Amino acid sequence: MNVSTPLFVTFAGYLLLMVAIGFWAWYRTKTFDDYILGGRSLGSYVTALSAGASDMSGWLLMGLPGALYLTGASEAWIAIGLVMGAYLNWRFVAGPLRLYTERTHNALTLPDYFTHRFEDRQKLLRVISALVILVFFAVYCASGIVAGARLFESVFGIPYAQALWYGAAATILYTLFGGFLAVSWTDMVQATLMIFALLLVPIIVVVSNGGVGPSLALIEQVDPGHLDWIGAGGIVAVISALAWGFGYFGQPHILARFMAADSVRTIPHARRIGMTWMILCLGGALATGFFGVAYFSANPGQAGPVDANPERVFIVLSELLFNPWIAGILLSAILAAVMSTLSCQLLVCSSALTEDFYRGFLRPKAGHRELVWIGRLMVLSIALLAIWIARDPDSRVLGLVSYAWAGFGAAFGPVVVLSLFWQRMNRNGAIAGIAAGAVTVVLWKFTGNALYEMVPGVIVATVAIVVVSLMGRAPSQAVQATHQQVRLALKESGY
């Protein structure tokens, strides 16, 4: 393994900083509430950047630039759909969910919220939603493991099987000990690193090509189709790309950031920070892949690694265009993106197993210390499962992410939105929506239809919720009273 000293130093320094934050958070974690939601203490800045970093995983610096490099401008519709969905999520879901989860027995997880929101004494909602989290997050965590492995494989020249363990080790360590506080504070550092990298790389690429005009001319020479906003997939592909935005309403790791905000009044300021960060990062990722086509057209001798795997375009450009010290920082941004999302996902899986299964069924009176250590054990278990799923060296980051994103968006998105705004929704409607959305995504994947499985999944889940709720009895007076109190409190807060 031949690694330059600057690269090794920057990577090692970054990893040590993340682990140090994890141990600092360990001393701040006193209760299970602290471990799962940080005691609902996040301010607007940390809430915004933590939500953004937990959202934008390794696919932002690898999968999305790779898609633009391979296909062209038509892939930008994914980013447009994500921006629209993220704004609506911040605007209409964040505040109500923060308040509602506090009013419903201080719910710590999404399954916990569903259980108390609909007075599910049989705990069917808790079991079904926790199972959905475990299934789709196992795939989602695997995507992060793959992205980290690709980075270590490319940068350090080590075999993929060995890179899997190196890529996951630091993330597992600080999540294992520090819990939610460690994840949130490291997210803030990682988000800052990501936006620096995603603004700098495309600017230098365009300058190296001689400017925007010459870059576009080079891209057109390679393939005029790269400039086509519709692309070979037609309108179905555009709808599928825009449908990524629906996924935001059902992502447990992003919704957990809203639940952890210190108050509803924090949300509007956090929204402005978060959306600005997101738009700049997505724009940088799109530009990196798109103008990377022009760079490698002018320098065909350097295109080999990217042609073999387009998802390496950001990595290769960073290594070619920058001083090794700067390249080390830029490549650490990929690791930051991977670690920020993977840590959030591991923690959500851990909370589902600990809060919704262990305390919910096995040890209802378990103490905080016991629950924290069970949570740590669950983090390790889920991480090992994700590494096992990611063991295939031919895995593609964007493919894994798109499937898990659709699963959560369809299973939880309609349930979350309607539970916040529709008083008439009942427990059976919620169960029907979660089951219908998840099953539709799984079955649609096997049909081979070009339409993204998110679209039929969200439609079927929404119809199932409405029909089953209207066919059954209305929620109890207590449930309806809580709903009205939440709406009134939101109105009084000016949200």
Image: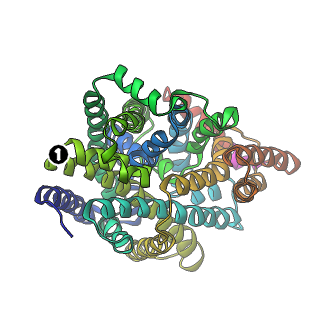
Q: Position of residue 447 (x, y in %)?
A: 76, 55
Q: Kindly identify the residue that appears in the image at 45 percent across and 29 percent down.
A: 221
Location of residue 80 with respect to 437 vertically, above or below: above
The answer to whether residue 223 shows anywhere in this view is yes
Q: What's the amino acid at mark 1?
A: Ile
What is the quadrant of the N terminus in the image?
bottom left
Q: Residue furthest right?
A: 471
Q: Magenta residues: mostly which secondary structure?
A: helix
Residue 486 sits inside the magenta stretch: no
Mark 1, other Cα within 10 Å: few <14 / some 14–19 / many ≥20: some
Q: Position of residue 328 (x, y in %)?
A: 20, 52
Q: Nearer the viewer, residue 266 or 282?
A: 282
Which color scheme does this rendered protein use?
rainbow
Q: Residue furthest bottom?
A: 362
Q: Secondary structure at mark 1?
A: helix
Q: Which residues are magenta?
A: 475-480
Residue 484 shown left or right of residue 258 in the figure: right
Q: Position of residue 451 (x, y in %)?
A: 70, 44
- How many circles with numbers are drawn on the protein? 1
The answer to whether residue 89 shows anywhere in this view is no
Q: Which residue is mark 1?
A: 326
Residue 357 occupies quadrant: bottom right
Q: Nearer the viewer, residue 344 or 337?
A: 337
Q: Residue furthest left?
A: 5
Residue 434 shown left or right of residue 215 in the figure: right
Q: Position of residue 469 (x, y in %)?
A: 81, 48
Q: Kindly identify the residue that appears in the image at 34 percent across and 46 percent down.
A: 314
Residue 180 occupies quadrant: bottom left
Q: Kindly identify the residue that appears in the image at 68 percent across and 42 percent down.
A: 418
